[in-house]
Image: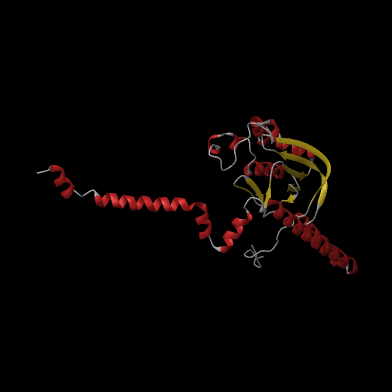
Amino acid sequence: MNPFVSRITHNQTWILPVSALSLVLGFMIVIVSRGTQSRFQMLDPEQQRRMAVLQPGSDAQQQQQISQKAAEVNNLRGQVTKLQNALAQEKSNATKVLNDSLQDVKFFAGLTAVEGPGVLVTLSDGYSADDTNKPPAANSGDAGNNPLTTEDIIHDQDILRVVNELYAAGAEAVSINNLRMVSTSSVRCVGNTVLIDGTRIASPIKIRALGDSDTLLGALRMPGGIVDELRSVNPKMITLEPVKNMTLPAYSGSTSRRYAKVTTSAP
């Protein structure tokens, strides 16, 4: 009697577990092969539209549309201010006082262009376009192992630390790459780009602040502060410059509120 025939005929317990593992492996291969395109297709239409806006190649067109809309908003708000001032001149002193108060509130809210002395802070990535030490692209396989991807690149927290230090030192108005900062402004990183109120900006990042130049510069140069930290990585990453007079644009974003309402009861 042949022993090999007996084993092949009766010892078949391996078939079921191997078949199950093959099915699981095939399922996993299908899931991985679908990649990010499948995840994109599973999003709802609104999310797909927002993701498509962030695709490479649409930057120039998007930035042009944003600039045009911002110019329209500022132009319309300027016309409203002119009408308010004209109305105040034709009415009583009480109306003029109310209009003056309204213009002060608009100034405080960042809805009017302002000018005055201050400082210009320029934040730049710590490498030039032709630098051989330039970090790899965000989708490069070596990006996670290269310290330049975190140390030599300006991040949202760097911008926020500069802006917070300026406000703490008495800055009366701040703009980032000609985008006016207001109470609802946001600064955050998305991939390898920085968004200011949803608008993409890139290095160099120019932060302008109105106030006493000496006080603002002294606050930024505080030992152990953001300036010392960035210069310890690369002196080219931050530069400070006092400015005798400069103009900051008005905030051009939405001012509508969906949830917050003015309370009518006493605090």
Of residue 150 and residue 23, the one placed in the foreground of this image is 23
Give the vertical position of 255 relative to 144 (above or below). below
Where residue 252 appears, as percent x and y from the top left, is 74, 57
Name of the residue lying farthest toward the right:
90
Which residue shows up at 59% across the image and 56% down it?
A: 51
How many numbered marks, from 0 up?
0
Residue 25 in view: yes
Q: Position of residue 179 (x, y in %)?
A: 73, 51
Q: Is residue 38 left or right of residue 241?
A: left
* Quarter that holds the C terminus: bottom right
Residue at 56%, 40% (x, y): give it.
140
Q: Is residue 11 above or below residue 77?
A: above
Residue 244 lies, in percent from the top left, at: 84, 41
The image quadrant of residue 237 is: top right
Q: Nearer the viewer, residue 264 or 40?
A: 40
Q: Nearer the viewer, residue 207 or 107?
A: 207
- Position of residue 254 relative to residue 9, above or below, is below
Between 131 and 112, the one nearer to me in the picture: 131
Image quadrant where residue 86 sits: bottom right
